Image (cartoon, helix red, strand yellow):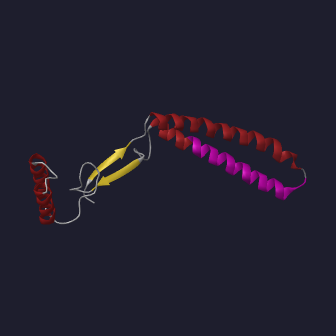
Amino acid sequence: MNGRRLHVTPGKHVRTAARAGVFVGIAFAIVGVVFGATVIPDMGGEPGLQVLATAFFTLFVGVSLFIAVQSGRVASGRGGATSLLDVEVEPGAPEGGSAQPSGDFADRLRKLDALRADGLVTDEEYREKRSQILGERW
């Protein structure tokens, strides 16, 4: 597409939620470290269970820190994406976002003539719509 590119940037609520994500991520990481440090040594003579618990708590802490870091990037506006959503608009697409009416120009002009002949549109509305249709890209 060779259209215009529109960006939706993070607003105040997104940044506030990201700050909360930083706090929650760090809190979960601390809880994971403390809980792992107290539970794993108390498992006694079960080496398989100790390895499994160590792997779980390591993954838990790692994911928590990842969430905190990514939330921090969004909250500060740094790194990676600068927008939440990228939208490309094709050239010739109407500004209002509605789809272009179907049919070619001649058909549309004939329909407009019929509407005026039936008295369903005023002369002013007819002239305005006719100039709009003729102003579109052929």
Q: Residue 127's spot in the image, x, y percent? A: 9, 50
Depth check, front residue: 8 or 130: 130
Q: Residue 35's spot in the image, x, y percent? A: 77, 41
Judge whether 93 appears above or below 66 on screen: below
Farthest residue, direction front: 118
Quarter-wise, where is residue 114 in the image? Answer: bottom left
Depth check, front residue: 56 or 102: 102
Does 114 sit left or right of 2 as displayed? left
Q: Quadrant of the N terminus?
A: bottom left
Q: Residue 36's spot in the image, x, y percent? A: 77, 44
Say if residue 137 shows up in the picture.
Answer: no
Principal SS element in the magenta part?
helix
Tally the numbered discs.
0
Say if residue 116 shows up in the picture.
Answer: yes
- What residue lies at 27% left-to-right and 48% top-to-bottom? 96
Q: Quadrant of the C terminus?
A: bottom left
| Magenta stretch, residue numbers | 45-68
Q: Residue 90's spot in the image, x, y percent? A: 26, 57
Depth check, front residue: 121 or 60: 121
- What residue lies at 61% left-to-right and 43% top-to-bottom? 65
- What residue lies at 40% left-to-right and 45% top-to-bottom? 83
- What residue lies at 84% left-to-right and 46% top-to-bottom? 41
> Residue 53: within the magenta?
yes
Farthest residue, direction right: 45
